[in-house]
Amino acid sequence: NSHYLNYTNESITGEVYTNVHTVPLSDVEHVAEILMLNNTDFTLPAGEITTIERTYMYNQILSESGLDSNADQINIFQLFSHAHEHMHRFDIELVDNTGNSELIYTALDWEHPPILELNPPLVLVAGQGLKMVATYDNWTDESLEFGLLSLDEMMIIFGYVYTD
């Protein structure tokens, strides 16, 4: 979850390093897929603190993540948030279709969001979902929207899942 802030009109080059570990195919228990739930439809009014919510229910999570639509359950074993510098707080709640919810994740630092490792994994079934609740402080004189630039804002849940 690297960030490069570029407040200039010039392009910058950054580097991100990762460690990749391989195992023999016979040792593979599950094949992980990337979980990315993205809210791109929000506006943060100038000079205001704003809280935005977005809920993804089971079938939406399958669809958004490109997972098998016939899966009986989703096994989430890692979660973290992604936002930019106006984020004040980012929560993820486990929800169901009866209105019950349980807070399972909180980030208070946009630059270093905690990574929630779940062992055993969080199991979602039909009728359940994830709700993201993010509070932003737009101290600028202009409204902000979702965008890929450093001056824009984001509201994304990342993680890893498997369905088998």
Image (tube, helix red, strand yellow):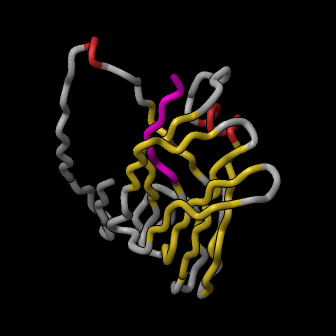
> For the point 43% across and 60% down, which residue is it?
149
Q: With respect to residue 124, does 9 lie above or below?
A: below
Give percent across and percent down for residue 87: 49, 73
Number of numbered markers: 0
The foreground one among 104 and 63 is: 104
Q: Which residues, given as a range, are shown in magenta?
A: 157-164
Q: Name above or below for residue 143 compared with residue 70.
A: below
The residue lying toward the viewer, choosing from 96 and 20, is: 96
* Position of residue 83 measured from the top left corner of the image (x, y, whole percent): 46, 63
Image position of 99 (left or right of 54): right
Position of residue 17 measured from the top left corner of the image (x, y, whole percent): 17, 45
For the point 38% across and 64% down, the residue is 113
Q: Which residue lies furthest to the top in this view?
A: 26
State which quadrant residue 142 falls in.
bottom right
Which residue is more in the foreground, 54 or 26?
26
The x and y percentages for residue 54 are: 68, 57
Q: What residue is shown at x 46% (from left), y 55% (from top)? A: 148
Name, please, the residue furthest toward the front.
120
Residue found at x 31% / y 65% = 5
Judged from this view, the residue extending furthest toward the right is 98
Dominant SS in magenta: strand
**Taking 27 as reference, is 83 above or below it?**
below
- Residue 62 on the magenta span: no
Lateral position of residue 104 relative to residue 54, left or right: left
- Residue closer to the observer: 16 or 68: 68
